[in-house]
Amino acid sequence: MQADIVTSLLTRALQAPSSHNSQPWQFAVDDARIELWADRRRALPVNDPDGRELLISCGAALMTLRVAAAAAGLAARVELLPCRADADLLAHVGLSCGPADASLAWLGPGIDARRTCRHAYDGRAPEPAVAAAVVAALAEEGAGLITVDAAQRLAVGELVAEGDRIRWRDRAWRAELAMWLHGRRDGDGLALPALLAPLARAAVRKLDLGKRVAGHDRQGLTQAPWLTVVSSEEDNPRAWLMAGQALQRALLTACRHGIQASYLNQPVQLPVLRRRLQSLLGTQAFPQLLLCWGYPQAPLPVTPRRSLDSVLHPAAGEPSRVRR
């Protein structure tokens, strides 16, 4: 595989979403195979003690790589968790010249256009055909989508607010969040203007803003045009990787129709709230993400990304180490 093609594919894969924009992935390249690795140095042990969101994030990067490959006319053969001896080796991706998956290739333009919407939506709900396409995208990757109906919204909003209050009372959680408030030039984290970032870090470490954040999130949830929960039938590393792939396939599908999403994952992150959410929804499936969808009122800013050099695994270029 030509180096410039691989470089292009990996550069596009970096556009995947991740918790706290932590970008917890690395890649190694060996001939026509790309390996995806978890970068545990970028884990969030307080926010994500089981590494569930880390693997969802890596799954999203894997799907982005698959879409980029298809858009380049390449076929991708994926093997998840190929090495029992090393749980951080998440996937082998074998690349070959066609036939490419046309349904994934169609999503290619969405890679650079997708954003996380941290601003207001214009109030329009996705048309039924678009919503159905999002559901189908998730199903293709083994995940489900549960729509939170009008009767459930208030209760789900209370779970989100309770999660905010629990999180913000936790000094360790605030300290971890503060660590990921970065200037935009840093290439990762929750981006802020460079002059504001140190002040924001100090404020987050010191202040319990749970009540204020809870009110803001509750209002955003009640105004979301479409509120959903991404679910999976199992709850283990393989299921989390699959959920991440499903998430990104759904996000890119929505993006092709002008729709962006935002996250309110507090009820999924805290086990006691997650069980209550599961009961409220009346499902045996495991909630993985809580998403709002809609049409942004205004253009959304680009989120910073790390350079390709910074995400190459130390084993890259050393076949004896890559092939375990």
Image (cartoon, helix red, strand yellow):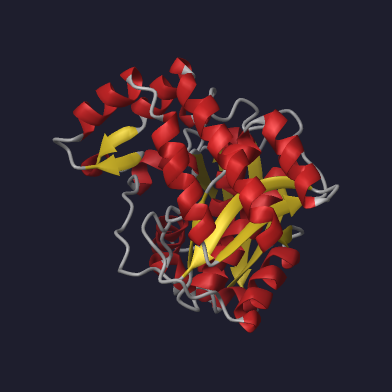
- Quarter of the picture containing the C terminus is top right
Q: What residue lies at 64% left-to-right and 83% top-to-bottom? A: 129
Residue 146: image location, x then y, percent: 72, 59
Q: What residue lies at 55% left-to-right and 48% top-to-bottom? A: 30
Q: Is residue 167 found left or right of 91 in the rendered image? A: left
Residue 292: image location, x then y, percent: 54, 59
Q: Is residue 307 found left or right of 160 in the rendered image? A: left
Residue 15: image location, x then y, percent: 42, 56
Nearer-the-camera pick, 287 or 233:
287
Q: What residue lies at 63% left-to-right and 78% top-to-bottom? A: 103
Q: How many marks?
A: 0
Nearer-the-camera pick, 297 or 310:
297
Q: Is residue 69 visible?
A: no
Q: Is residue 297 visible?
A: yes
**Residue 228 to residue 208: above or below:** below
Direction right: furthest residue: 284
Nearer-the-camera pick, 219 or 189:
219
Q: Is residue 144 found left or right of 189 in the rendered image? A: right
Direction left: furthest residue: 195
Residue 94: image location, x then y, percent: 64, 58
Q: What residue lies at 49% left-to-right and 38% top-to-bottom? A: 24
Nearer-the-camera pick, 126 or 116:
126
